[in-house]
Image: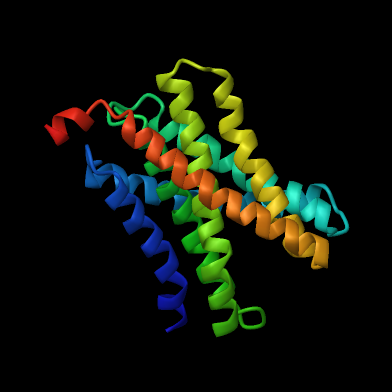
Amino acid sequence: MLIELASAPAAAGLFFLYIKDKYEKEPWKMLFLGLLFGLYTAAVVYACGTWLEVQMPHEETPLYTAFFSSAGVEETIKFAFLFLLIWGNRNFNEPLDGIVYGVFLSLGFAWVENIIYVTHPVLGGYETALTRAVLSVPGHGLFGVQMGYYLARAKYKKEKFHLLLAFFVPYLAHGLYNFFLLKKDGICWLLFAALEVWLWVSGLRKIKELQNISPFRQKKLG
């Protein structure tokens, strides 16, 4: 039952993005690869995190954990895998595809991470499953929206600076997201709520924006 609860929020996010990709659906093979790359990302993040702990012993502070061992490692590896997956791929043939694959990869990662947390003998359980279903898994999906959006801008608007933003924006959002949660004080809860609202509003707007400039839109509507 816990594994089903851990999987449900990721499945819901994947289904949501599949529906939003309404003008030119991605091949099932590529969607599966996006998800698979996310699963591989989780393994690489774990290996890198373990190696860094050995090479750089440190005290776990909210700042270090949020911006280095969590967001730093995870978003760097997710960006590398996403770039390798789609940048030169012929299926990346409309801007929204950047967000679709960004979310599929991010939620593949979140799916594995969520199962590990929810089934943990000490940290896991139904309360953990509920909390992560509301916060952690959607958070990873929203970071994937930002990464995919700026990757699409870099490719289709020829704005190469957006390659930097494709990493930096989700990294900063992820770092702040974790930092505010780890600090657990009144001001940080307010800042977290503001960040959460921004991620949802900005993410939905970016999806709509890239839907509207799809080269397949007029063909589908007409």
What coloring was used for the rendering?
Answer: rainbow
For the N terminus, the quadrant is bottom left
Front residue (pair 44, 78): 78
In percent of width and height, residue 38 lies at 46, 50
Q: Is residue 177 above or below residue 145?
A: below
Residue at 60 percent of width and 42 percent of height: 170
196 sits to left or right of 59: left
Residue 125 appears at what percent x and percent y? 57, 83
Q: Along the horizontal axis of the image, is 154 left or right of 125?
A: left
32 relative position to 108: left or right: left
Q: Residue at x 40, y 49 (%)?
A: 104
When asked about the image quadrant of residue 216, the answer is: top left
For this orientation, the residue located farthest to the left is: 222
- Return the x and y of residue 159 as percentages of the image width and height: 51, 17
Q: Dividing the picture into quarters, in which one does residue 222 lie?
A: top left
Identify the residue at image location x=58%, y=19%.
161
- Camera-nearest residue between 183 and 91: 183
Vertical placement of residue 55 versus 168, above or below: below
Q: Residue at x 44, y 55 (%)?
A: 108
Does any portion of residue 125 appear in the rendered image?
Answer: no
